[in-house]
Amino acid sequence: MGGPTSQSILVVGGGMSGMTAAIEAAEAGYEVYLVERNPYLGGRVAQLNQYFPKLCPPYCGLEINFRRIKQNPKIKVLTLAEVESITGQEGDFDVSVVVTPRYVNEKCTCCGKCAEATTIEIDNPFNYGMDKIKAAYLPHDMAYPMRYVLDPALVQSPEAQKVKEACPYDAIELDMQPQKVELKVGAIVWATGWNPYDASKLDTYGFGTYPDVITNVMMERMAAWNGPTQGKIVRPSNGEIPKTIAFIQCAGSRDENHLPYCSGICCLASMKQATYVLEQIPDAKIYIFFIDIRAKDRYEDFYNKVKENENIIFYKGKVAKIEKADDSDKLVLRVENTMTEELNEIPVDLVVLATGMEPSTASQPLPIPVAYDDYQFLPGIDVQPGIYAAGCVRMPTNVAEVVQDGTAAAIKAIQSIVRR
Ligand SMILES: Cc1cc2nc3c(=O)[nH]c(=O)nc-3n(C[C@H](O)[C@H](O)[C@H](O)COP(=O)(O)OP(=O)(O)OC[C@H]3O[C@@H](n4cnc5c(N)ncnc54)[C@H](O)[C@@H]3O)c2cc1C
Ligand code: SF4
Ligand code: SF4
């Protein structure tokens, strides 16, 4: 006991785990700062098309959380924000947060006039660069906060003034500067989630060389109504409907050269995506190449249901190489059938690499020294006294589990404050 204390809680990362931690702590009466790097909340879940196992749209769950955040004056949301430094100890942390300018203030009504006024386009980060958007943009149709963003490329361009003048609500501030926000908090929840493993490191699969080799997160966007093809599953090379689709499981996972662990989720994600394909292309032929399938507990029913579909071939074998066919525009997969030990060449129209989840801390560790496990995940909920981890930053898993984890971390943070 003793020394200055703060009753506030800082939550870093506004995905499902961080939003849950923030809401639970605020609804228990604590003041919460929720710091999110993106211009919107929701994390990677906002980029999914549907959730397994029920296959409902992610907005159902997200909307409820956004409403609870909006209605709760105890939660202060900082978007486009990152934690620069943390000093102090449990009960008494000083935190420095840097907020990058959005160049658009709260007067924005999302009328879209600024986007009409600019000719500058950027790769769309929400769709993993599969399409372009105007450099004045709403990050996605259901974004929270529902407010436009101006890309620095536009702000620094000769078009900036014209775009500002096009705004009927005086919402554009071209002279917005990065801001430093100093916070005093008693406890911290770190919930910065995961990044998709970089498929360009899988050099035999041709990602980046062959446009028809995509990743599972790209498939989520392609199948989504607000995605780059408005939900239509196509071959990126020519816009045609793929008739044969291959899902490659463990693409870079359970491999000492890449991610040595199992992400636990990508088998189910591919099965879910196979159902997206068959909804649109009922006569499509789908291969799922696997080492073994991970679908535990209640998800096993989903696996069993998918397995019954005769258009989906579960093929036990490791794809060694993907190449372009000599005599057509197809891709050819060279694969060894583990059951028969035969080497096969299988032509397909579209390949989906089921890449795994890498903790965000692998590329961006906490700004103070803490322990990580062998794979750079935070090793447990208790990181150090007063700092707690939640969600995929500590283990690759599904939404239901990260929500529980967010709640657990909020309780730990509250206990830490109460203890002081
Ligand atoms: C292909 C695929 C499909 C999936 N489909 C499903 C499904 O159908 N059902 C299901 O239950 N699960 C699914 N998942 C898993 C699901 O995406 C995760 O469980 C979920 O995203 C975890 O939420 P999170 O909050 O822990 O992390 P994230 O969603 O990654 O959120 C973390 C947040 O932290 C922010 N952040 C990161 N670094 C910083 C920083 N330094 N400072 C501030 N903010 C930061 C990020 O911008 C992000 O908003 C799927 C996963 C994959 C790979
Ligand atoms: S910044 Fe102005 S012009 Fe752009 S969407 Fe918002 S209100 Fe409309
Ligand atoms: S969940 Fe499936 S695809 Fe993903 S790493 Fe584990 S076994 Fe491989």
Image (tube, rainbow, N blue to C red):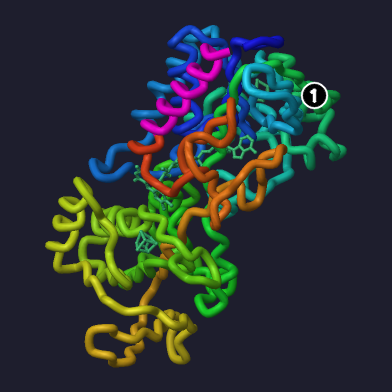
Residue closer to the observer: 111 or 368:
368
Residue drawn at (53%, 69%), measured in percent from left and top?
211
Q: Is residue 273 above or below residue 245?
A: above
Q: Which region of the structure is painted magenta?
A: 403-420
Q: Position of residue 151 (x, y in %)?
A: 73, 38
Instruction: Give above or below for 191 relative to 52.
Output: above
Q: Does 415 appear in magenta?
A: yes
Q: Is residue 283 visible?
A: yes
Q: Quadrant of residue 4?
A: top right
Look at the image and tell me in which quarter the C terminus lies.
top right
- The secondary structure making up most of the magenta span is helix
Q: Which residue is mark 1?
A: 179
Q: Residue at image x 73%, y 24%?
A: 88
Assess whether residue 31 is covered by the magenta stretch.
no
Q: Quadrant of ligand 3?
A: bottom left
Horizontal side of residue 50 vs 105, given as left or right: left
- The amino acid type, in three-letter code, at marker 1 is Gln
Q: Position of residue 330 (x, y in %)?
A: 42, 80
**Residue 32: which quarter of the image?**
top right
Task: Describe the element under mark 1 as helix, strand or loop.
Answer: strand
